[in-house]
Image (cartoon, rainbow, N blue to C red):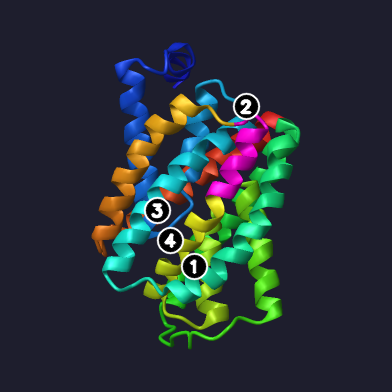
């Protein structure tokens, strides 16, 4: 493991081995985030192993996220799964909240950010272990296309603040909240998630870029993998792999969250 860490830190971003690693990891993260969520922690770990502070790793992931979810939104729309009216109503308050969250994350001390992120990750683990999607899948009603209330708007603004602060797990939050609050089914909630992320992530990316927290060469190469993984994930209904992916993500987040806490104790 230490040899891999040394390799990532000492390799040029345009070397073929490192380009391959970035694309492959981007593919895996894009695939998992499209059909479930929480996999962005893998990219944080990779970028930190390359020597980035966590605040820059946080900003660098955002280009790939934008590219990935723009692709998956098109696929979901073509499949008739994307309810654009609902997704826009969710995406606008999420985007508004994300601006503040990204500003805080891009200017905060990396040490403090790591501790806060570790706490968020352990909360995310509870959602994944509980496997809330099994509960949510019992919901079979649909949104009526009406306007969402003020308190629901405020709730999505809060989720957006979290998403601006860190992308890890925000897709799951949008997914769960869309089902529980908007009373939509899980399939269409996933469509809402795709477009909502597209609406908020560019604003977060711009905020990180203004504060010098984006490594553009890495972001572009990694983003290519995100697009490929997102596209495959949006085209495949993989029932056999859902449980494996969930537990794979749980293991990765557990290791990364524990590392952040131990590193800062």
Residue 161 in the figure: left or right of residue 187: right
Q: Residue 7 location, x and y as percent?
A: 42, 14
Comparing labels 4 and 1, the label whose residue is closer to the camera: 4
- Please say if 201 is above or below 93: above
Q: Residue at image x 52%, y 74%? A: 178
Q: How far apart, in angstroms, are the residues tagged by discs 2 and 3?
A: 27 Å
Marked residue nearer the N-terminal end (4 or 3): 3
Comparing labels 4 and 2, the label whose residue is closer to the camera: 4
Is the residue under label 3 in contact with that under label 1 (CB below 8 Å)?
no
Residue 218 magenta = no
Marked residue nearer the N-terminal end (4 or 2): 2
Marked residue nearer the N-terminal end (4 or 1): 1
Quarter residue 26 falls in: top left
Where does label 3 land, which residue? 70
Residue 209 magenta = yes
Where does label 1 land, which residue? 175
Q: Secondary structure at mark 1?
A: helix
Q: How far apart, in angstroms, are the residues tagged by discs 4 and 3?
A: 8 Å
Where does label 2 land, which residue? 53
Q: How far apart, in angstroms, are the residues tagged by discs 1 and 3?
A: 17 Å
Marked residue nearer the N-terminal end (1 or 3): 3
Where does label 4 land, which residue? 194
Q: Residue 181 location, x and y as percent?
A: 58, 79
Q: Residue at image x 30%, y 58%? A: 234
Q: How far apart, in angstroms, are the residues tagged by discs 2 and 1?
A: 29 Å
Marked residue nearer the N-terminal end (2 or 3): 2
Is the residue under label 3 in contact with that under label 2 (CB below 8 Å)?
no
Viewer-closest of 34 and 205 = 205
């Amino acid at each position: 493991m230490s040899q891999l860490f040394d390799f990532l830190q000492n390799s040029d971003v345009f070397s073929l081995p490192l380009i391959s690693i970035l694309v492959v990891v981007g593919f895996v993260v894009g695939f998992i985030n499209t059909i479930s969520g929480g996999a962005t922690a893998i990219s944080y770990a990779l970028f930190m192993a390359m020597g980035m502070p966590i605040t820059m790793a946080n900003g660098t992931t955002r280009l790939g996220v934008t590219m990935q979810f723009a692709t998956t939104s098109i696929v979901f729309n073509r499949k008739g799964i994307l309810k654009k009216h609902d997704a826009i109503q969710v995406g606008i308050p999420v985007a508004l909240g994300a601006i503040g969250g990204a500003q805080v994350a891009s200017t905060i001390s990396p040490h403090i950010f790591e501790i806060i992120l570790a706490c968020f990750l352990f909360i995310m683990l509870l959602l994944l272990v509980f496997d809330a999607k099994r509960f949510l899948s019992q919901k079979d009603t649909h949104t009526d296309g009406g306007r969402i209330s003020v308190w629901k708007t405020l709730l999505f603004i809060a989720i957006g603040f979290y998403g601006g602060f860190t992308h890890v797990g925000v897709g799951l939050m949008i997914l769960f909240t869309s089902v529980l609050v908007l009373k939509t089914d899980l399939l269409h909630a996933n469509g809402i998630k795709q477009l909502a992320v597209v609406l908020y992530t560019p604003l977060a990316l711009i905020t990180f870029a203004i504060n010098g927290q984006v490594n553009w060469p890495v972001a572009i190469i990694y983003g290519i993998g995100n697009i490929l993984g997102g596209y495959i994930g949006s085209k495949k209904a993989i029932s056999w792999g859902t449980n494996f992916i969930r537990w794979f993500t749980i293991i990765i987040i557990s290791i990364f969250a524990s590392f952040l806490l131990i590193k800062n104790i």
